[in-house]
Image (cartoon, helix red, strand yellow):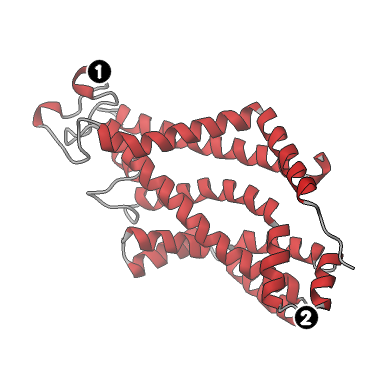
Amino acid sequence: MTATVSPSVSMSVWAQARRRFLANRAAVGGLIALTLIALLAILVPMVWPHSLDEGSLTAIGQPPSLADFHWFGTDANGRDLFVRVFFGARISLAIGLIATVIALTIGVVYGATAGYAGGTTDLVMMRVVDILYALPLLFLIIVLVTILGNNIFLIFAAIGAVEWLTMARIVRGQTISIKNREYIEAARAIDLPTARIISRYVIPNAIGPVIVYATLLIPINIIVESSLSFLGLGVQEPLTSWGLLINQGASQLDSAPWALGFPATLLAITMLSFNYVGDGLRDALDPRQR
């Protein structure tokens, strides 16, 4: 006889988690900030009177002003920074999200397989993780980007393919803690395939730490992309990202500090917001708080 959890109990658990999250003012504030930045990243490039590459010789290095809709000023080529900063937000957030999805997919499947299999399989798989951990991850990403080229989609793949190691360890630990519980034993007793047990029972029950780590991995991936773009190995013109804008702004720090200040400030706000949301989710999903 298998133990089951009624839908009402399950909904009650999630309802309690939602209430705890909404009670965390910092987490809610971070979520609001992220939502606002994401909306601006979508809408501003669509409705703003200046385009991404529209430059003007008469507007080179113009400071922030409400005149002519140059709210963040202009860069060394006379291009409006407001539209460029929020188009850069679109690219940076997309890289952070897509690379995180890739990393989580690899890490969750790898960690769940290792933890459920146990024995020699687990030992060998985790030794591979240990070896990769010993290598400088940013260096590996730079090597991959250098080999594969600066295509934006390859940047997604390169970052995601390297950032899965911690997730694999987290999911492996969760899998080991739940693989001998009653519902897993019941699934084995009716001869369910291992792949189905892992996908239907193991991974869903390890989803809490996965969600929390995802909110922390997104800003890490944004920073990695920004570092690559700052080094000239990431997003290239005519596209832009926060890392590329910060790189360009750093070269104009004396003459046009706003070119560095606005993208750097938005990047910092985004990092803090993701951290607050991650902390809020961690506390909300902590079983000790139930």
Residue of label 1? 66
| Residue closest to the eye, 135 or 40 | 40
What's the residue at 69%, 52% (across, down)?
A: 209
Examine the rendered structure and indicate whether residue 42 appears above or below residue 33: below
Label 1, residues with CA under 10 Å away: few <14, some 14-19, many ≥20:
few
Instruction: Give coordinates of residue 200: x percent, y percent.
Output: 69, 66
Q: Amino acid at mark 2?
A: Asp
Examine the rendered structure and indicate whether residue 203 appears above or below residue 245: below
Q: Quadrant of residue 120?
A: bottom right
- What is the secondary structure assignment of the residue under circle 2? loop
What's the residue at 26%, 33% (across, down)?
A: 47
What's the residue at 83%, 43% (across, down)?
A: 288
Instruction: Give coordinates of residue 256: x percent, y percent.
Output: 26, 28
Q: Amino acid at mark 1?
A: Leu
Position of 21 with respect to 2 (left or right) is left
- Whether residues under marks 1 and 2 lie with C-beta atoms below 8 angstroms apart, the answer is no
Position of 242 with respect to 270 (left or right) is left
Instruction: Give coordinates of residue 3: x percent, y percent.
Output: 86, 61
Residue of label 2? 191
